[in-house]
Image (cartoon, grey):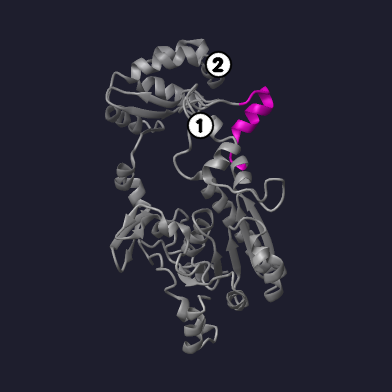
Amino acid sequence: MSKKQSTKTKQPLKGIKVIDLTRVLAGPYTTMVLADLGAEVIKVEMPGVGDDARHFGPFIEDKSGYFFSINRGKESMTLNLKKPEAVKILKKMIIDADIVVENYRPGTTKKLGIDYDELKKVNPKIIYAACSGFGHSGPYSNFPAYDMIVQAMGGLMSITGNPDGPPVRVGSSIGDITAALFTVIGIMTALFNRQKTGEGAFIDVAMLDSQIAILENAIVRYIVSGESPKPLGTRHPSITPFQAFSTKDSHIIVAIGNDKLWVKFCKAIDREALLEMPEFETNDLRTEHLEQLIPLLDDIMNEKSTEQWIEIFDSLQIPSSTINDIEKVFTHPQVLARNMIIDAKDKDFGTMKMAGNPIKMNILKDEKHKKPAPDLGEDTERILKSLGYSTKEIKRLRKEKVI
């Protein structure tokens, strides 16, 4: 694509149709990212019930804010996939679709007759992404999974929290969200491959696998030392000082990632004498002698307020930060400058703010206002009519609880 053409494109995935058979978080987050990139996403839900997340709080005038925040920009139709006629309708939708995303427990879609082997008979080029707890192979494949289960099983909770403290869950649903992001990567790769070969693909992403994939230095530390890493609070296991310190009025994060920064840091805190101490000369030595160094820095950091330290460190470009609560995140100038707080307007309760799209591209319009999450089944009739169903047939399908 030429530069002239690319700058005109505002939705890179425009023209890509996604059939979304997902619910709760990992799957819907996957399809939300695709919708943000311009794909048409048709969310297929159970009549009368819908996605489980529609029933999760917090609620805004009887609507789930949780559901609203991760289903923006999608369309919704209802299909009772336990009924053969609903499966027939779904297969009609697959004919001109590009992607199917589901997060059923492995084996469920086969029982329903909508697994990859069945759907590729209808559309050989279909890209079928299955995002599940444990994947479509292995002894745990059919086990139920939730975010905290995979955080625990995947080792993440064992390295999270304070030393000698109780197990701590990571504050966001990182088990679901990392799986969602890896699923998006798989889908994008399959789209690129299909462009070259004309072939569809089956993508199998597991939440547990995704947790293992992001353990990074914890795995290396275990391999090198033979000992399982333990929680370190805010401290980095191999960079020092790189952690939270208490100040005169709150806490501050300081991240001294190399020896040049250590020199700047010592000058900033007016403790150049530390530069003369051989045990602190290099990062490896500082980490080796952290039990000597950290108490010294604790005393120093308590001499000023967080705001005073931030002013000093910012002026010298020493990596540091306040520990912001969510209210402060919503007003942070960098967050606002990057359009990371957006909104969508619901016809019933009005405007709701939510996190924006972190993927910034010159070929993608970074919108401040998004299309809201759909009401349950609000697009069913329109979609069925586009498939050739008459008003009379749609009434019959409703009566028979197919839709």
Name the residue: 54% across, 57% down.
27
Measured as percent of width and height from the top left, residue 380 is found at 47, 76
**Can residue 183 be seen at all in this image of the molecule?**
yes
Measured as percent of width and height from the top left, residue 205 is found at 63, 52
Name the residue: 49% across, 54% down.
25
Please state which of the two labelled residues, at mark 1 or mark 2, is closer to the viewer. Answer: 1
Vertical relation: 327 (above or below) 183: above
SS assignment for the magenta stretch, majority: helix
* First in residue order: circle 1 vs circle 2: 1
Q: Quadrant of the N terminus?
A: bottom right
Q: Mark 2 — residue?
A: 288
Measured as percent of width and height from the top left, residue 389 is found at 53, 86
Q: Please indicate whether residue 116 sits to the left or right of residue 289 in the image.
A: right
Find out whether residue 110 is within the magenta segment. Answer: no
Amino acid type assigned to the residue bearing label 1 in the image: Thr
Q: Residue furthest front?
A: 400
Q: Please indicate whether residue 105 sits to the left or right of residue 281 in the image.
A: right
Element on which disc 1 rests: loop
Find out whether residue 223 is within the magenta segment. Answer: yes
Nearest the viewer among 91 and 105 is 105
Decide: few, some or many residues near mark 2? Use Cα within 10 Å; few <14, some 14-19, many ≥20.
some
Name the residue: 30% across, 44% down.
327
Measured as percent of width and height from the top left, residue 121 is found at 71, 74
Cα distance between the residues tagged 1 and 2: 21 Å
Instruction: Please give the range of residues in magenta.
Output: 213-228
Element on which disc 2 rests: helix
Decide: few, some or many residues near mark 1? Use Cα within 10 Å; few <14, some 14-19, many ≥20.
many
Amino acid type assigned to the residue bearing label 2 in the image: Glu
Name the residue: 41% across, 11% down.
273
Q: Mark 1 — residue?
A: 160
Nearest the viewer among 114 and 352 is 114
